[in-house]
Amino acid sequence: MADHSNSPGKPKFSAEIIKERLRTMTVWLEQVGDFARALDWLGAAEKHAAGSDEQKLVNVRDEVDFALSHFLRRASIEQRVRAETTHCLDLLMNAAMQRRGDGADSLHLMRRFHELAGDETDGGEPPPETFPDSFAWGAYLRVSALAELDAYLGPL
């Protein structure tokens, strides 16, 4: 059998390097959260004297929060892209739940989830706490809220 590890279009990867980077990212994310929470007692930067150590720490904490928001936005995009080809049901479910406001995309992801997860039903009714059950309950609550809003507003 031919060695295709160095063929064009197929980069060579090391599972160990990828695992190590994943562990590093996980530790980093946990440390970022711990760091920011530890500095929350400082409050707003304006409460501290200009140039003080406290103000510097607040500014760094706020930079960490900004970096975290950027990371999460990027992670959300990557999650949605990965949802098209992943075999990880957790990632796919999270992507579908994030797309709840986009009916067509959410339905597409739910169908993909169902294809991968197989039949979760036991004779026709989904058991409690399944992904379709959770989604249906959420849709029911939203539709109910719309009906209440319509009754409250009356004819326009």
Image (cartoon, grey):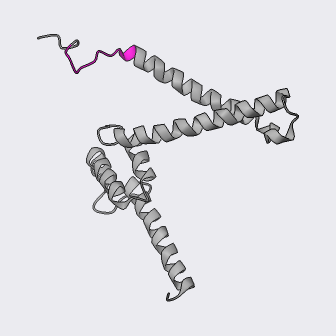
16 vs 121, left or right, is right
Quarter that holds the N terminus: top left
Q: Examine the rendered structure and indicate whether residue 77 appears above or below residue 152.
A: above
Residue 115 in view (yes/no): yes
Nearer to us in this view, 116 or 100: 100
Please provide the residue range marked out in magenta. Answer: 7-16
Q: Is residue 133 magenta?
A: no
Q: Residue 24, how many percent across, how many down? A: 53, 21
Q: Examine the rendered structure and indicate whether residue 72 appears above or below residue 118.
A: above
Tell me the residue at 29%/53% (across/down).
111
Residue 120 in view (yes/no): no
Q: Is residue 13 magenta?
A: yes
Residue 61 in which image quadrant: top right
Residue 27 in which image quadrant: top right
Tell me the residue at 30%/54% (across/down).
108
Q: Residue 34, how many percent across, how many down? A: 68, 31
Q: Examine the rendered structure and indicate whether residue 2 appears above or below residue 42.
A: above
